[in-house]
Image (cartoon, helix red, strand yellow):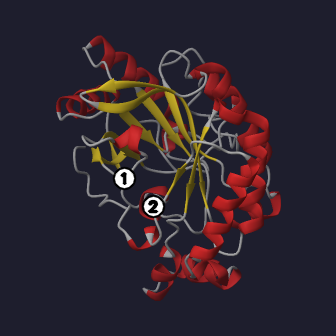
Amino acid sequence: MSRLSYDPTHCTLCPRRCGGDRTRAKGDCRMPDRPVVARAALHFWEEPPISGEDGSGTIFFSGCPLRCVYCQNASIALGEAARAITVERLAAIMGELEAAGALNINCVTPTHFAPQIRAAVALAREQGMALPVLWNTGGYETVEAVRGNVGFVDAYLTDFKYADAALAARYSHAADYPEVALAALQTMVEVVGAPCYDEFRGQERLVSGVVVRHLMLPGALDNSKAVVRLLHERFGSDVRLSLMNQYTPVIAQAAAAGDRRAAAALAASPELATTVPDSEYEQLLDFADALGVEDYFWQEGGAAEESFIPAFDFTGV
C-alpha cells in the first residue's frame, strides 16, 4: 500500500509499536485493517488558510494512537462512532469533497491508517483530484511514518501538546510524547519545508509546510510556555504556531452523564473540569510576543463556548 513495509498482523505504524493484529481489530488503536471514518464534510473551524470561506474537505478517522483523558472528540477516538470503508471509497470521498468546493483534503487523526490513506490519495489523484492533502495529527508520529508520507502529503497540521513528560503521561498515557513529537516535527519540517500559500478562488490557502497547534489546558500555563519557547527556539519561522484556548471540559459533561471512564479520569485530574481562564491565555500570548514569535494564530476570548465539535453521524461516508 505504501513504500513502507506494513504487516497488518503486527502493526507498528504509531510510536506505541504495539504489534497488534489489525486484521482482528486488535492493538492500542482498536481499529481494523481498513479505513474507519466517522464524518467527511466541509469544515469551517480550522485556521483561516486551511478553512478559508469555502471550507476544508475534512475526513475524520476513528480511533487514535493517543488516549487523552480530556479528548474533545472522544466518541471517534474511542471508536464509538466508526464505519469501515474501502480504499476505493476513501478515494471517492476525496473527489466528492473537491467537487463540493473544498480548499484541501484534511485527514484528521490519520496515523493508524497511513498506508490506506496514501493508497487512497494516489488513487484519487489518478482520478483527477488536485487539492493539497493535509495530515491533521496529534503529533504522536514516528519519523518513519512522516518520511513515508512524502509524495502523498503536502502539509501538516500537527499538535504539540506537551513539553512536560509527566503531564503527557498523566493525560495521554505517553510519557515519551515530547521527544517523539519533537523528532516527528523536525522531520515534517525537513520534508515539506516552511509554510507556503497560494491564492485559490480569492482565498489564501496553505499548500505546503507545517502549522503547529497547541491547546492550552487548565492549570498548565507553564507547560504551554515551555512548548512555545521550545518551538520558537528550535524552528522559528519554519513553522507557524496556532495557540488555542478552546479547551472544552467534555470530560465533566461525560462524567455527569454517567460515563465511568470519564468519572475516574476526572477524579484523578479534577482541574480538567474547568475551561482555561482568559487571563492565562492572555499571559501565554504576551509570553509569545515577548519571545519574538511573529505571525501566529490566536483565538478570540470565549472560544470554548463555541461549537468546534461536529456531529460524527457518518455524513459523507
**Badge 1 local density, few (<14 within 10 Å), some, or many (20+)?**
some
Say which amino acid is labelled 2.
Answer: Asn
> Label 2: which residue?
73
Give the quarter of the image for residue 234.
top right
Q: Nearer the viewer, residue 126 or 4?
A: 126
Please tell me the numbered disc located at residue 168: none
Residue 36 seen from this side: no
Q: Where 218 sits versus 223, above or below?
A: below
Q: Where 303 sits versus 22, above or below?
A: below
Q: Where 315 sits versus 303, above or below?
A: above
**In this rendering, would 140 be left or right of 89?**
right
Say which amino acid is labelled 1.
Answer: Trp
> Label 1: which residue?
45
- Residue drawn at (62%, 20%) of the image: 191
Q: Nearer the viewer, residue 271 or 77?
A: 271
Mark 1 to mark 2 CA distance (whole Å): 14 Å
